[in-house]
Structure formats: C-alpha cells, structure tokens
Image: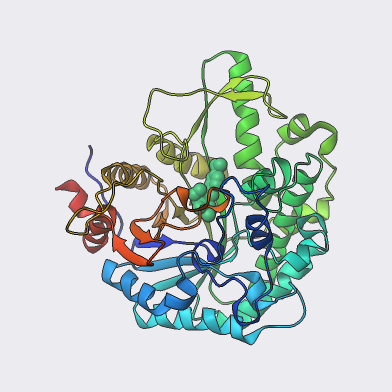
Amino acid sequence: MTRVSFPDGFLWGAATAAYQVEGSPLADGAGPSIWQRFCHDPRLMAAPGHSGDVACDHYNRMEEDVALMKRLGLQAYRFSVAWGRILPEGTGRVNEAGLAFYERLVDTLLANGIEPICTLFHWDLPAALDDRGGWLNRDIADWFVEYARVLFERLDGRVKKWVTLNEPWVVSDGGYLHGALAPGHKNMFEAPIASHNMMRAHGAAVKLYREIGAHEIGLVVNIEPKYPASDSAEDQAATVRADAYMNRQYLDPAMLGRYPDEMREIFGVAWPDFPADDLALIRQKLDFVGINYYTRNVVTDGDGFLLRTAPVKQDATYTETGWEVYPRGLTDLLLWFKDRYGDLPLYITENGAAFYDPPQAEDGAVHDPLRVSYLKKHWAAVSDAIAAGVDVRGYMLWSLFDNLEWSLGYTKRFGMVHVNFATQERTPKDSAKLYTQVIATNGAVLND
Ligand code: PNW
C-alpha cells in the first residue's frame, strides 16, 4: 500500500445516532418517535422483537461512555438529538429534562477534550408529527426550524459543528418508497415529496443558523458511487439514473439549487414540479458537507422498479449487510464531489462495516480482522483523496458501539466497541485498539 498521510488538525472521531444507542426512549417526558412505533410493530421489523427500548443504555451510562471515548483517544463524537426528547409533541412545549441530557452530554464531552458534532435529525421523527403528515406536510420545514432554534439557542458555542439531516435518501427510499424503514410507507408518489420537504427543512434550518448561530453547519448525505457493468450505452444510462437517484438528488439541490433532469425520467408522473422559491431556500451556503460511505454499486440496465437497473454482484468481499468492500469508491467519490461541486470542507461522517465477530477470547479480546482490514483500506482511500487535493477535514467511524441496526435490530454489529446486550459490558475490539494508535499518530502507524 502507498504511504498514508493526513494534514495537521485532521479530526478523528466516531459516530452514533440517538435511537440506535440511547435506550429509555420515553424517559423524562420524551414523546415517542416513528422508530418507537416501527420497532413495536412485528409486521414491519425485519428483526421482530428488537427495539431501541434499551439499546446500549447510553442514556443511563453517558458519563462512563464518554470516559471510554476519552480512553480510546477520540477527538470528536458525532451524535444525534432525539427531537421528541426536546419537543415531545414535535412542536410547542419544550421538555427541559430532555434538553438537560444533551447539555450534560456536550459538557461531559468538552470536559474530556472531545469535540461534539451534533446531528439534528437522524431518522427518529416525533410520532406526533407523523400524525400530522410527517415529511409529507409542507409545514414540517417550520416545525424543524422551531426545533432547531431551541438547540441552537441552548447549545451553539458549546457545539461548533451542526448537521441538519442525516442521509435524506435513506429516509425517502427506505421510509416512503420501499417501507423497510420508519414510517414504513410504500408509495412512489410520496418519496419525492418527503425528500423535497426534508431538503426544505434543511435549507430553512441553515438560514436560521446564519441569523442566530456563530459556528459551522452542514448536511450529511450517503454517497454510493455507481459504476457501469459494461460500456454499453444502456448500462451507462442506467448508471447515470442510479447516480441521480441516490447521490445527485440531494447534493444538486443543496449545492446547485436544482434537481437532476433524470428525476422526472425516473419517477415519471410521480415527480412534481417544485416551486423555484423552494429551490432557492434549499440552496444555502454550507460550511461543510458530511459524507457517509459504505460501498459502491455496479449497475446494469434491468427491470428494477422506477430506476430500471439491476445490481451486478462482484467477485469481492461482502459485509454482513451485503455491501461490497470497495475502498477505491471512497477516493473516487471525494474526487467527484470536488469536481462537480467545487472546494468545500468535507468530513467523512460515517464509514465502517458489519462483520461477523468471533466470540470473545479467553482474555476478553474481540478479534475483528475483517473490520481492521476494511478500516485500513478506507483510511488509505481518504489519504489518497487528500493527496489528490480534496479538502477532507476529518473521519468519523461508524460506529462507536454495536447498536440497533434499525429494522435489522441487534443482528448486525458495526461497533469498534463490542457491546454485550445482556450485561451492557463494553469491550473495545482489535479495530478500536488500532484506531487509538491511528489517532495518536495521525495515521502514521499505518505506514509501519
Ligand atoms: C447509515 N444504503 O445508514 C446510517 O446513518 C446509520 O444509522 C446506519 O446504522 C449505518 O449507515 C449502517 O447501515 C445507511 O442502503 C443505510 O445505502 C442504508 C444505506 C446507507 C446507509
């Protein structure tokens, strides 16, 4: 492998999301979320019976968890806020007890020298707002601003990096088109509207932040680069559609103020004419973009729903979630971003893998060689992009802990720290031990 190198001040951290780790989702006056509902409907969950009721019990173990982050040497921690802890009905009454949890978390992180990166929305929409139409109701941009204002007013300054939304594509595709994620709808007419209202909410929150915030705010998207299976015109066109749908559908409006032309071809009559004013609102100057990268996709022309594509299986290693290990895709997408959208600070806000972890060894160790190998290759891929001139400022590993992998429950483990869900014991895996060295040497240990 080529030598890796990261600029001084490169920010190394780890990420989680509220519903996946906190547990106690209704504690201290919190209102239920759509994920609370989804998990408790066995017809919806791929892993029925699994839920965020306990998860990693982080809500009750926050102080020791931050102490563990400190021991691991993390410089940053990307977490999300459960909207329903702050506003139990989604709008209106503020629940001070819920807010207090995040104030304590942020203060504890700062006391330990760990930079908080706060995501406002990582999928756990208050159920009360879903009852009013959720992301399908245009008013949700105002509801989101009301929620964001409470957090900005209370925490800006202590939090200096804010994220509006995590992965709007996954919410629209999983939650509104295919029904695999909350709120579990399967409606091709809803998906574009949900996406558009998420992007309007994003734009409106950034606009508010420019009025009352003093630090940095950005958007987090998942990017999965698309490669054609052959050089046939059909496969090339299929690849362009797949890329528009998953990648450009969100970055083009946020960065360029327009949707890709392919959206109408993909959705047909289900793609509405969106008002120009909306696109002006969506396109706000961002301080950074966060990119979540897990895998790539090789595409052929096919009969898949809407996109008319089919994935092509590769002769490669696949993770437990069925994702091809393809580090080069991370370098490619970072170069693509710079080329298409220009220079902007980028963070890798998620990257990691679920693999089968062997049982704990006699000395308690958890050997996870596949994850170690995955991470080493992806760190090298980030270093390659930086060497090629992309302004990547940091890397957040997904995830700090084994946690609730949404509809798949606890069956897929992404953590660098093993969690025994019967005892809540935390055990850093080999990948975590390596990561500690990587952070301490700013990557240099990878060249040994
Ligand atoms: C992300 N896809 O989800 C989420 O931000 C995390 O909460 C989640 O646990 C993690 O990745 C692992 O899945 C994704 O189908 C879900 O491309 C699906 C996709 C991408 C990201």
Q: Position of residue 379 (x, y in %)?
A: 32, 47
- In the foreground, 264 or 86: 86
With respect to residue 448, does 393 lie above or below?
below
Identity of the residue drawn at 22% across and 37% down: 1
Q: Position of residue 13 (x, y in %)?
A: 37, 62
Identity of the residue drawn at 57% across and 70% down: 81
Outermost residue, left direction? 448
Q: Position of residue 232 (x, y in %)?
A: 57, 13
Quadrant in the rendering for residue 238: top right
Residue 330 shown left or right of residue 125 in the figure: left
Q: Position of residue 156 (x, y in %)?
A: 55, 79
- The colouring scheme, among rainbow, by chain, secondary structure or one colour, is rainbow
Residue 17 shown left or right of residue 447 in the figure: right
- In the foreground, 55 or 223: 55
- In the foreground, 29 or 353: 29
Residue 425 shown left or right of residue 206 in the figure: left
* Residue 290 visible in the current orientation: no
Identity of the residue drawn at 64% across and 19% down: 302
Identity of the residue drawn at 53% across and 43% down: 223
With respect to residue 313, does 50 lie above or below?
below
